[in-house]
Image (cartoon, rainbow, N blue to C red):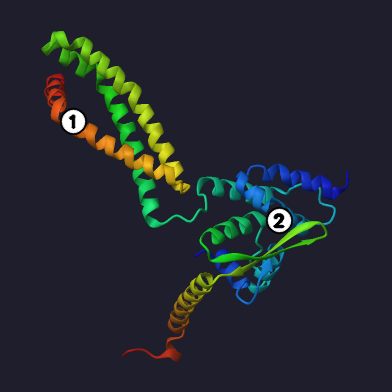
Amino acid sequence: MQEATFLILTALADGAQHGYGIIMDVQQISGGRVKLRAGTLYTALDRLRADRLIAVDREEVVEGRLRRYYRLTPEGTKVLAAEAARLQANAAVALTRLRPGLAGGLA
Amino acid sequence: MSDTQTLERAYRRILSCYPRSFRADSEDEILAVLLATAADGQTRVGPGEAWDLIRGALRMRLWPAAPRPRTVRAAVALMLAGAAAELAGLITVLVTASSVHAAVAARYPAATQATTVHYVFVLAGLPVAIGLWLWLAWANGRGEDWARMISAACFGLLTLSVLSSLSQHAATYAPASMMAA
C-alpha cells in the first residue's frame, strides 16, 4: 500500500471527511510532511471507491459547491488494520535491532 | 472576470483531460478542493499542480479503477499476449514471404496463384486479428459482459481454425520453408 493511500484511509478511520478535510488531516497526521495534491487525492479516492474500501457517506452543497464526504467501509477498516499491524511489526523489529543493548539477543 | 473565475477556467481546461465518467461524477468536487487549496489571488495553475492533475488523468485512462476480479485481469493479459503473438506472426509472414513463395513456386509451379491468394488473406487478416484482441482486452478490462461472450466465441473459432490448418496446411509450410533455407 502506498503511503498516500495509507494516510487517506487513516484520515477516514475516526469518521467521514470531505476531500479538503482529508488533505488537511493527512498533512497533520504526517507532521506536515505529506501535502496531498488534488489530482493525487482524487485518483486515490477513485481507486479506493472502486475497490470498495471507502464509500460516499453524504453530500452537501456549501457556498454553491459540492462537498462529498467519504467514510471507511468495513472492508476498508479491515485492510487498514492489517496494514497498520504490518507496519507496526516491521517498525518494532527495526527498533529492536537498532538497540541491541536494550533488547538483548538469542545468544 | 474575477481571479477565482480565471483560475476556475484554467483548472477546468486541465480537468477536461479526465475520463468523462469521472468528470460527470467528481469534476465540481475536485474543482472545489483545487480552489480551496489555491493561494489568495492565484490566477494560474502552477506547474506542480498541473503535472499532478495530468498524471492523475493518465492513470485513470490507462488503468481504469473498475473493480476487476483476478480472472478478468488474467483474461485481459492473455488477450494482450494474443495480440502480441499475432503481431509476431505478421512480422514472420512479412519477413519470410518471398522465400516461402519462391520455394512453393519451385516445387509446385501450379500452386503459385493459390499461395498468393492465401498470402493476401493472411496479410489482411492478421492486422484485423491484432485489432480484435486489443479491442477485446480493452472491453473486458472495463468489465463489459458482451465482451466476455465475444471473447469466448473468438477463442472457439480460433481453436477450430488452428486444428483445421494443422490437419491440412501445416504440412505444406514445413517443406517449403526447409527448401527456402
Q: Looking at the picture, which amino acid does disc 1 mark?
A: Ser
If the image is split into quadrants, where does the N terminus of chain B sit? top right
**Mark 2 nearby-residue class (10 Å; few <14, some 14–19, many ≥20):** some
Name which quarter of the figure residue B177 lies in: top left
If the image is split into quadrants, where does the C terminus of chain B sit? top left
B143 up-or-down from A75: above or below: above
Instruction: Say whether residue A49 is left or right of residue B137.
Output: right
Which disc number belongs to residue B147?
A: none
Q: Earlier in the sequence, mark 1 or mark 2?
A: 2
Indicate the position of residue A34 as horizontal and vertical percent values.
64, 65
The residue identified by callout 2 is B29
Q: Looking at the picture, which amino acid does disc 2 mark?
A: Glu
Indicate the position of residue B171 as horizontal and vertical percent values.
12, 26
Q: Residue at x 29, y 30 (%)?
A: B89
> Which chain does the residue under circle 2 lie in?
B
Name which quarter of the figure residue A22 lies in: bottom right
Instruction: Say whether residue B37 is left or right of residue A95.
Output: right
| SS category of the residue bearing label 2 | helix
Distance CA(mark 1)–CA(mark 2): 57 Å
B122 up-or-down from A70: above or below: above
The residue identified by callout 1 is B164
Instruction: Say whether residue B132 is left or right of residue B94.
Output: right
